[in-house]
C-alpha cells in the first residue's frame, strides 16, 4: 500500500507530536481521508523526511507523531533553472508539476510579449504565485522530493535572460543546434521556454545576445507544456539522473 507523503512547513524533530493547522488538517482528513493509526511521511522542504503516525483524526484535532529522521534525498545533481513563459492555467500547472518531477531546481514564470495570460495587477499576480507554489508542493509530495524548488515571482523575460549563467538554452523550432551537439555542462543549466504564442523575434535576438543557444527538439512544434517536459527529460537523460 502506498504511504502518503505530506508537506508540513514548520520545525520538525524526531518524537515530536505535531498538531496540524486548519488547512493541513482538512487536507489530511478530508482529501487524503486518512484514519487514526495511518502511516505517512512528512517533510518540511529543508531536506530529509520523517516517518509519522496519525494519532488524532477528527474535526476538532488532527495530529501526527514523528519517527526517526531519514536523510533521504531525491535531488538532481544537475542544477537546472527553468524560465517558463506564462500560459493558461492548466498548461502552466502541468508544466510546473512535470518540471518539479523531473528535478528542476527553480522555476521563474516569464512575462513575454505573446503571453495569452496577462497578470495586470499585484493581487492577481500574488494569487497565481501562491497557486503555482501549491502545484510545486503537491508535485514534491507525489514524486518523493524533500526540497521544494523555488517558484520565483513573475519576471520580465528580458531581465531574466541577462541574469542567467552556465549553459543557456532556449527552445526554438528554427534552432539549428540539438542537445547531442552540445558538450556536457560543467555547471548550471538555464532553460527558457516561450508562452503559447512562442517567442517574438526581438526576444529570440535578445536571448542570443544574452548567451543563449537556440535549441531544436525534433521536427515537430511542441506546445509550451510539452516542450518543458520534453526538454527537461532529454537534459536529465543526457546529463542528469535519468540516464
Image (tube, helix red, strand yellow):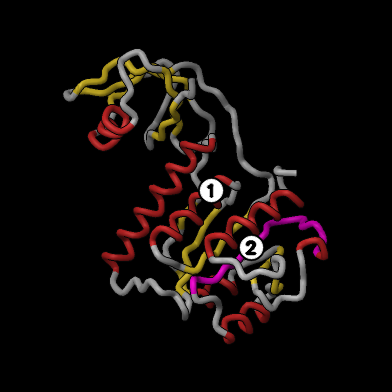
Q: Is residue 180 left or right of residue 80?
A: right
Mark closer to the chain start, 1 or 2: 1
* 171 is higher (above) or lower (below) than 42: below
Question: x and y percent of residue 77 in the render?
Answer: 68, 45
Q: Is residue 174 left or right of residue 68?
A: right
Residue, x 50% and y 62% (percent of image)?
A: 108
Residue, x 38% and y 61% (percent of image)?
A: 89
Dividing the image into 4 quarters, which one contains the C terminus? top right
Question: x and y percent of residue 207 in the render?
Answer: 63, 77
Q: Nearer the viewer, residue 37 or 196?
A: 196
Q: Is residue 101 left or right of residue 189?
A: left
Task: Read off the residue under disc 2.
Answer: 190
Question: x and y percent of residue 232 in the render?
Answer: 64, 55
Q: Is residue 49 magenta?
A: no
Q: Nearer the viewer, residue 209 or 91?
A: 91
Task: Read off the residue under disc 1.
Answer: 100
Q: Is residue 184 magenta?
A: yes
Amino acid at each position: 500500500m502506498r504511504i502518503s507523503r505530506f508537506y508540513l512547513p514548520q520545525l520538525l524533530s524526531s518524537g515530536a507530536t505535531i498538531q496540524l493547522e486548519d488547512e493541513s488538517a482538512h487536507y489530511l482528513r478530508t482529501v487524503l481521508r486518512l484514519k487514526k493509526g495511518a502511516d505517512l511521511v512528512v517533510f518540511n522542504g529543508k531536506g530529509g523526511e520523517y516517518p509519522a503516525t496519525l494519532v488524532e483524526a477528527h474535526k476538532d484535532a488532527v495530529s501526527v507523531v514523528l519517527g526517526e529522521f531519514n536523510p533521504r534525498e531525491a535531488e538532481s545533481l544537475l542544477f537546472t533553472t527553468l524560465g517558463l513563459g506564462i500560459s493558461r492555467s492548466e498548461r502552466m500547472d502541468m508544466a510546473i508539476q512535470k518540471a518539479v518531477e523531473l528535478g528542476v531546481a527553480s522555476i521563474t514564470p516569464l512575462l513575454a510579449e505573446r503571453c495569452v495570460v496577462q497578470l495586470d495587477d499585484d493581487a492577481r499576480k500574488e494569487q497565481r504565485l501562491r497557486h503555482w507554489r501549491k502545484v510545486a508542493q503537491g508535485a514534491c509530495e507525489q514524486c518523493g522530493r524533500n526540497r521544494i524548488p523555488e517558484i520565483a515571482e513573475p519576471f520580465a523575460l528580458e531581465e531574466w535572460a541577462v541574469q542567467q549563467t552556465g549553459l543557456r538554452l532556449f527552445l526554438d523550432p528554427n534552432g539549428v543546434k540539438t542537445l547531442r551537439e552540445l558538450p556536457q555542462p560543467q555547471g548550471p543549466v538555464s532553460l527558457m521556454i516561450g508562452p503559447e504564442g512562442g517567442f517574438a523575434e526581438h526576444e529570440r535576438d535578445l536571448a542570443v545576445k544574452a548567451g543563449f543557444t537556440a535549441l531544436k527538439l525534433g521536427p515537430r512544434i511542441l506546445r509550451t507544456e510539452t516542450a518543458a517536459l520534453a526538454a527537461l527529460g532529454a537534459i536529465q537523460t543526457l546529463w542528469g539522473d535519468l540516464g
